[in-house]
């Protein structure tokens, strides 16, 4: 019945500020923009779609509740160093699990994002 996750969406309050964060700070490539500019999609090269929107009425950005997204990254240490230079807020600095390393950052709107890297053998 279910085929795949179609997209993960985060609410934003200021679309210009949010787009600047995702496109310039994180380097995501814009895929689609709705006619009114209230829905933005970023298709990721390895699959999956991340969307931001101002259409989520009554839903506020939050890093303390709701769902979250984890972006698989090539080099966690390099990305963390870059984001710290740009003074991005961190909820959790780099930590390890048995199979991966992660860090959790806060976007320009207050949502939490997990940066994830599988441990290499």
Image: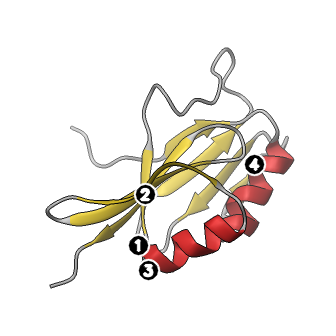
User: Residue placed at 44% from the left, 47% from the top?
Assistant: 69
Mark 1, residue position = 46
Residue 44 placed where, x, y %? 50, 67
Residue 66 placed where, x, y %? 45, 27
- State whether residue 28 appears in this view: no
Q: Nearer the viewer, mark 3 or mark 4?
A: 3
- State whether residue 84 appears in this view: yes
Mark 4, residue position = 18
Q: Quadrant of residue 68?
A: top left
Badges 4 and 1: C-beta atoms under 8 Å apart? no
The outermost residue toward the top is: 58
* Local secondary structure at mark 1: loop
The relative height of residue 4 versus residue 118 in the rendered view (above or below) is above
Q: Nearer the viewer, mark 4 or mark 2?
A: 2
Badges 3 and 2: C-beta atoms under 8 Å apart? no
Which quarter of the rendering shows the N terminus?
top left
Q: Answer with mark 3 or mark 4, whichever residue precedes in sequence.
A: 4
Badge 2: residue crowd in 10 Å (few <14, some 14–19, many ≥20):
many
* Local secondary structure at mark 2: strand
Q: Answer with mark 3 or mark 1, whichever residue precedes in sequence.
A: 1
Q: Report the Cα–Cα distance between label 4 and label 1.
A: 22 Å
Q: Answer with mark 4 or mark 1, whichever residue precedes in sequence.
A: 4
User: Residue placed at 14% from the left, 85% from the top?
Assistant: 121
Badges 4 and 2: C-beta atoms under 8 Å apart? no
* Local secondary structure at mark 4: helix
* Local secondary structure at mark 3: loop
């Amino acid at each position: 019945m279910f085929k795949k996750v179609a997209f993960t969406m985060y609410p934003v309050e200021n679309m210009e500020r949010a787009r600047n964060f995702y496109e310039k700070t994180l380097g995501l490539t814009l895929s689609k923009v709705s006619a009114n500019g209230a829905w933005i999609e970023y298709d990721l090269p390895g699959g999956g779609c991340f969307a931001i929107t101002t259409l989520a009425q009554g839903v506020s950005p939050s890093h303390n509740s709701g769902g979250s997204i984890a972006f698989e990254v090539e080099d966690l240490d390099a990305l963390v160093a870059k984001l710290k230079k740009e003074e991005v807020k961190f909820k959790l600095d780099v930590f390890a699990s048995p199979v991966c390393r992660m860090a959790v950052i806060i976007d320009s709107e207050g949502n939490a994002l997990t940066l994830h890297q599988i441990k290499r053998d």
